Amino acid sequence: MKLFLDLLFPRCCIGCGISSPQIFQYICWDCWSASAQIEAPFCKCCGDPVAGAIEHDFICYSCSAKSPVFDAARSAARYDGVVGEALRKLKYENALWLAPDMAKLLHNCLEAEYPTQKFDLIVPVPLYHVRRRHRGFNQSAVLARELGRRMGCPFSSSVLRRIRPTITQTNLTAKERLSNVNNAFEYKKKKRLSGRRILLIDDVMTTGATVNVCAKALKKGGAVSVHVITVARG
C-alpha cells in the first residue's frame, strides 16, 4: 500500500527534494543528520545545551537562579535547518502532513530522555481561542495527538486553556516573555488531575516561560509531575 501511494503521491524531502526518503516520510537522512540535534551535555532541568565537555550533572544559571515548576524539559533538535523548516511549514502553511515526522522526533526524544518515566496523560500547550479559530488548528495539539497514538497514552486538549491573548514571543527578552505569558493559562477545574503524571507538549521551547506557566497551572490542578517535550529548542 505504501509503495502504491508513493507512486500516486510521490514523497520528497522538504530539505533537499530527494524522492522517497526512508527514515522519515518527508525528511531524508542526510538533511536530518545535518540538523543540530540536541545531545548531552545540557542542563538536566531545562535541557538547554551547553558547550564544552561536562561529565557531571549540570544545571544552567537560569534554573539555578529560579527552579522551574516543570520537572524536566527536553527537545529533539535546534530550531533551524530542516526541523525549523518543517515546523514553520506545519504552523504557518497548514502542512499537517508533516505532523507524523515531527511526532516521530518527539517519540525518539522521549524514549532517549525519559526511558523509565511513566505518563498518565499527554497535554498540549493551548492557543487562545481567537488565534486557534484564525489558524484552524493548534499545532501543539496536532503533535500531542499523534504522539499519543504512538505511545498508547491518553491525550487531552481540554485540560488547559489560555484565558487571555498573548503577543508572539519571538522578539521578546526573557523577562518580557515571562511577563507576556504570566497568568495566561488555567486548568479546567472539572478535569481531574490529582496524582496524575503529565507529559506537556509544544512545538518550540526558547526560554521555557510558556511551558513553565503551563506546568504551574497543571500542578495547581493536582498533577504530581509535569515533564516537557518539544520538537525544537529556540
Image (cartoon, grey):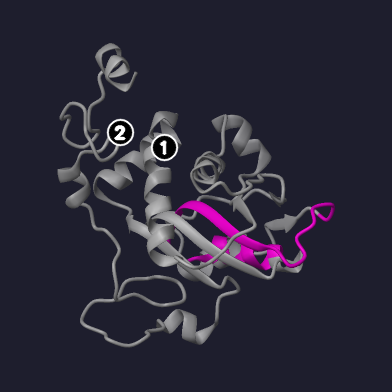
Q: Secondary structure at mark 2?
A: loop
Residue 44 sits in quarter: bottom left
Residue 128, horizontal then vertical, whole percent: 65, 44
Quarter of the image with the C terminus in it: bottom left
Closer-to-camera residue (85/99): 99
Residue 217 on the magenta span: yes
Q: Which range is magenta?
A: 189-218
Residue 227 sits in quarter: bottom right
Residue 25 disc label? 2
Does 110 sit left or right of 66 as displayed? left
Q: Secondary structure at mark 1?
A: helix
Residue 134 disc label? none
Q: Which residue is mark 1?
A: 100
User: Are there few (<14), some (14-19), or many (20+) residues within 10 Å of tag 1?
Assistant: some
Quarter of the image with the N terminus in it: top left
Residue 232 sits in quarter: bottom left
Label 2 amino acid?
Gln
Confirm whether residue 207 shows in the render: no
Query: From the viewer's perspective, is residue 208 above or below residue 167?
Result: below
Residue 77, horizontal then vertical, whole percent: 32, 56
Residue 132, horizontal then vertical, whole percent: 61, 36
Confirm whether residue 29 shows in the render: yes
Work out how far the residue at label 1 is from the one at label 2, CA to CA, in angstroms.
Answer: 8 Å
Residue 181, horizontal then vertical, whole percent: 61, 60
Does 201 sit left or right of 157 as displayed? left
**Which residue lies at the image location 21% right of the left edge and 80% below the top edge?**
52
Is the C-beta separation of discs 1 and 2 under 8 Å? yes
